[in-house]
């Protein structure tokens, strides 16, 4: 065998080895069924009505949408409330979370009928991870300074709500949302997930680039870590209200309906 032929064989062997490694490195994938059920969970400083604009668009597409009323007392209570709703769904279901509710989706998303996860400017901790410590690796968002506590319960003050939480909404609309925010139990902030559903389920993430409630770079970090299909919206923390078409379309993609 001459030198040129030998070099060619060696090059082919190296290429074959590299290709084999690449194939082995890819996780096994299964065809994901279409989901006709969407379950949506709200976070702090809000209630289930914050999903109204998104829900109306999903209903127009013929999907079944249900908003969970997060009790805001403990992660366990919230997961139980979400699981009760998930148990009522027949067939594949997309679980959607905003803000703090990302903790809930990360825990409850292991339910067998959850086919995909959608995070909207949401927390996405790993199993057992201290989210507060994770967030501390990034500059604190302005809304943090606007949280008040009394007798173990917390809420976001009006100035911070209008400026840092709902900054791209009309003032009148933002004030209505402020009026219906539910207080949260302070101990809720220390709760940790025991599962990370995004490690098992396909995930989508909407980053709010103008977010003053969760640092946008933290959102990007979490989205990248979970290998989520990611979009970025020039939005406040409430993209589900200021950009309902984009959020609805992201959910439709996760449901295999787009």
Image: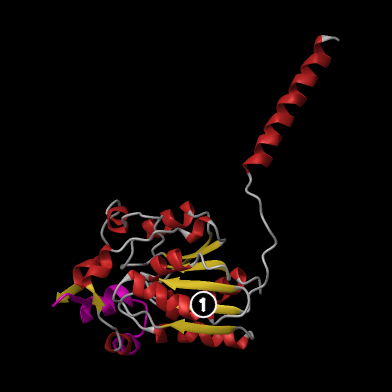
From this viewpoint, is residue 69 visible?
Answer: yes
The percent position of residue 149, horizontal first and vertical second, equals: 16, 75
Residues 164 and 222: in front is 222
Does the magenta segment cover residue 48? no
User: Left or right of 180: which side holds 115?
Assistant: right
* Region rendered in magenta: 151-175
Q: Which residue is mark 1?
A: 86
What's the residue at 50%, 59% (across, down)? 198
| Label 1 neighbour load within 10 Å: few <14, some 14-19, many 20+ | many
For residue 146, side relative to residue 205 (left or right) = left
Q: Quadrant of residue 202?
A: bottom right
x and y, in percent, of residue 154 in the image: 21, 76
Q: Picture coordinates of residue 174 (x, y %)?
A: 32, 85
In what quadrant of the picture does the C terminus appear?
bottom right
Location of residue 202 with respect to 137 vertically, above or below: below
Image height of 225 relative to 4, above or below: below
Residue 186 in percent (x, y) is at 22, 71
Q: Compare residues 253 and 47 and report the one nearer the observer.
A: 47
Note whether 206 is above or below 13 in the view shown.
below
Residue 33: quadrant of the picture: bottom right
Magenta stretch encompasses residue 159:
yes
Q: Is residue 97 left or right of residue 185?
A: right
Q: In this view, which residue lies farthest toward the left?
A: 151
Does residue 207 appear in this view? no
* Residue furthest top in the image: 2
Q: Residue at x 27, y 66 (%)?
A: 189
Snapshot quadrant of residue 59: bottom right
Comparing 177 with 124, the one in front is 124
Q: Dot 1 lies on which element?
A: helix
Quadrant into which the N terminus falls: top right
């Amino acid at each position: 065998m001459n030198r040129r032929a030998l070099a060619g064989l060696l090059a082919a062997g190296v290429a074959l080895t590299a290709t084999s490694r690449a194939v082995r490195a890819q996780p096994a994938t299964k065809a994901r069924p279409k989901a006709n059920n969407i379950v949506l969970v709200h976070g702090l400083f809000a209630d289930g009505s914050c999903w109204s604009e998104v829900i109306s668009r999903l209903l127009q597409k013929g999907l079944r949408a249900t908003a969970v009323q997060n009790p805001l007392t403990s992660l366990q209570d919230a997961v139980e409330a979400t699981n009760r709703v998930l148990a009522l769904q027949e067939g594949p279901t997309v679980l959607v979370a905003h803000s703090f509710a990302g903790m809930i989706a990360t825990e409850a998303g292991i339910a067998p009928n959850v086919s995909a996860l959608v995070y909207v400017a949401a927390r996405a901790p790993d199993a057992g991870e201290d989210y507060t410590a994770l967030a501390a690796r990034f500059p604190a968002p302005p809304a943090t300074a606007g949280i008040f506590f009394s007798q173990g319960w917390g809420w976001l003050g009006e100035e911070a709500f209008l400026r840092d939480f709902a900054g791209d909404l009309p003032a009148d609309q933002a004030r209505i949302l402020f009026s219906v925010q539910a207080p949260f139990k302070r101990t809720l902030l220390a709760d940790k997930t025991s599962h990370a559903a995004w490690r098992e389920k396909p995930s989508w993430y909407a980053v709010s680039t103008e977010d003053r409630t969760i640092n946008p770079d933290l959102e990007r970090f979490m989205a990248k870590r979970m290998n989520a299909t990611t979009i970025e919206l020039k939005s406040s923390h409430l993209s589900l209200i200021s950009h309902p078409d984009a959020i609805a379309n992201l959910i439709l993609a996760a449901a295999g309906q787009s």
